[in-house]
């Protein structure tokens, strides 16, 4: 990238501004689609939560929240509507720890005036953070929770040093400007054509749960045997779990009425990719893109070993820097287009909803997102029993999975708006058939 292009991109990547009215932010490239396509059910909220070794002290957690939120000013925001674009202003009403409920990520609307774009909830021994994809992705959300926990335990008398963990910040230091950058804009290039169009994908045929009810089913699996099984099958852990999801999709498709299945013979599993692995940035805003592994059921069903092999090769083929750059180019060029910029927001909203349907949820059957191994300062490890990562609810795909690992255990959590438990049942049964011990928990087991 030439020096002039890099300078232009860095300027366009800036999200934080200040004028006579005070500080304000623009949405990053991924966040711009969220306001017109979310409501109080499809909230855009993903959740990362920790279960600790004591009942949560609400006073200490409240104090820790206030300190941590000051260090993450680019999260402590509310959505505002302009004539051409949405923008973000500091949330000044004061953050409060909320009591957790049985359904996560529900009863929340980012478009409601006076709503902060993340919230912290607690109950018994659980501390949960729920973030709108307007402001961050899983990596940024995890960094916030890690800092919140370190500050909470510091206030509770557990001495904690971050050591070499770059995710733990000094809360009394001002944030680096790069933490709030729109890294998509920073690494934009117009050298590549847009990706080829994709066919509409099969969606699980299930009625929806009652409004504001979101089921979470978590399979808890020892990490080492899971890694060994993935290696035995010639795949990474993420590839294995995505293959398990694809295998379940195949079973559901085969059991579907012939007419509806024939209309959508393409199965598509989306796997988010943390772009920070390709492009250096300290950004805590969104910086993930997605690759799709597909299967055309017109070619007939496939055995599980073949599904694993295809998943391995498809993801390796798709997770390529130049292929990824195509997505950045397509997504950013639309926002930079002067004609798009001059379209009133009301019209943009209409087209955004159509775009999200035709080029978003309509192209995938569901997703599996792996946040990886969570680390914390050594002296805090015994204080934290577990972490879990729960996907944002989606009406179109209904059931998707999120994964993370902590202290030798793998937590595979399905978030579902579907009445049917079939996706969760098939995935967890397949893991058991692979010889892995799986403990299952569910917030709505009926």
Image (cartoon, rainbow, N blue to C red):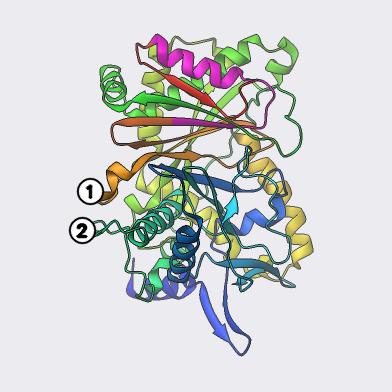
Give the percent coordinates (x, y) of residue 91.
Answer: 61, 70
SS state under label 1: helix
SS state under label 2: loop
Q: CA distance from mark 2 to mark 1?
A: 9 Å
Which residue, as the protein is rendered here, is positioned at the far bottom? 20
Q: Is residue 212 above or below residue 189?
A: above
Bin the neighbour count of mark 1 within 10 Å (Cα to Cα): few under 14, some 14-19, many 20 and up: few
Is residue 444 visible in this depiction of the protein? yes
The disc at residue 163 is: 2
The residue tagged 1 is 378
Q: Is residue 113 magenta?
A: no
- Bounds of the magenta span? 412-433
Between 24 and 12, which is closer to the camera in this rendering? 24
Q: Is residue 220 above or below residue 317?
A: above
Quarter of the figure with residue 430: top left
Left-right relation of 1 to 182: left
Contact, mark 2 vs mark 1 (Cβ under 8 Å) = yes
């Amino acid at each position: 990238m030439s020096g002039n292009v890099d300078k232009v991109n860095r300027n366009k990547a800036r999200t934080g501004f200040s004028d006579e009215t005070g500080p304000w932010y623009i949405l990053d490239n991924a966040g711009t689609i969220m306001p017109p396509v979310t409501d109080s059910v499809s909230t855009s909220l993903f959740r990362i939560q920790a279960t600790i070794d004591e009942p949560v002290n609400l006073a200490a957690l409240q104090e820790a929240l206030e300190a941590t939120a000051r260090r993450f000013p680019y999260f402590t925001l509310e959505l505002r509507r302009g004539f051409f674009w949405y923008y973000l202003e500091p949330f000044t009403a004061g953050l409060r720890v909320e009591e957790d409920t049985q359904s996560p990520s529900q009863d929340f609307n980012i478009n409601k005036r006076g709503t902060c774009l993340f919230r912290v909830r607690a109950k018994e021994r659980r501390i949960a953070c729920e973030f709108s994809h307007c402001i961050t992705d899983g990596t940024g959300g995890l960094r916030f929770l890690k800092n919140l926990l370190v500050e909470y335990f510091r206030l509770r008398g557990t001495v904690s040093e971050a050591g070499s963990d770059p995710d733990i910040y000094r809360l009394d230091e001002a944030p680096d400007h790069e933490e709030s950058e729109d890294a998509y804009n920073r690494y934009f290039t117009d050298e590549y054509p847009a990706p080829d169009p994709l066919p509409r994908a099969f969606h699980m045929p299930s009625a929806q749960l009652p409004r504001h009810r979101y089921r979470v089913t978590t399979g808890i699996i020892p990490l080492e045997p899971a890694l060994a099984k993935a290696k035995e099958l010639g795949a990474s852990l993420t590839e294995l779990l995505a293959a398990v999801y694809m295998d379940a999709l195949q079973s559901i498709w085969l059991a579907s009425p012939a007419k509806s299945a024939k209309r959508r013979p393409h199965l598509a599993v989306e796997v988010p990719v943390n772009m920070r692995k390709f492009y250096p940035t300290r950004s805590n805003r969104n910086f993930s893109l997605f690759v799709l592994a597909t299967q055309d059921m017109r070619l007939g069903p496939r055995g599980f070993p073949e599904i694993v092999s295809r998943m391995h090769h498809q993801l390796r083929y798709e997770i390529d820097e130049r292929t990824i750059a195509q997505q950045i180019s397509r997504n950013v060029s639309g926002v930079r287009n002067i004609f798009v910029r001059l379209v009133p927001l009301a019209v943009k909203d209409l087209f955004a909803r159509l775009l999200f349907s035709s080029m978003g949820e309509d192209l995938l059957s569901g997703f599996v997102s792996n946040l990886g191994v969570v680390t914390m300062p050594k002296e805090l490890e015994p204080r934290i029993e577990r972490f879990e990562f729960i996907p944002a609810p989606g009406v179109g795909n209904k059931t998707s999975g999120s994964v993370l690992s902590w202290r030798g255990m793998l937590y595979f959590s399905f978030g579902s708006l579907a009445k049917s438990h079939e996706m969760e049942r098939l995935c967890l049964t397949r893991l058991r058939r692979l010889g892995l011990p799986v403990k299952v928990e569910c917030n709505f087991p009926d």
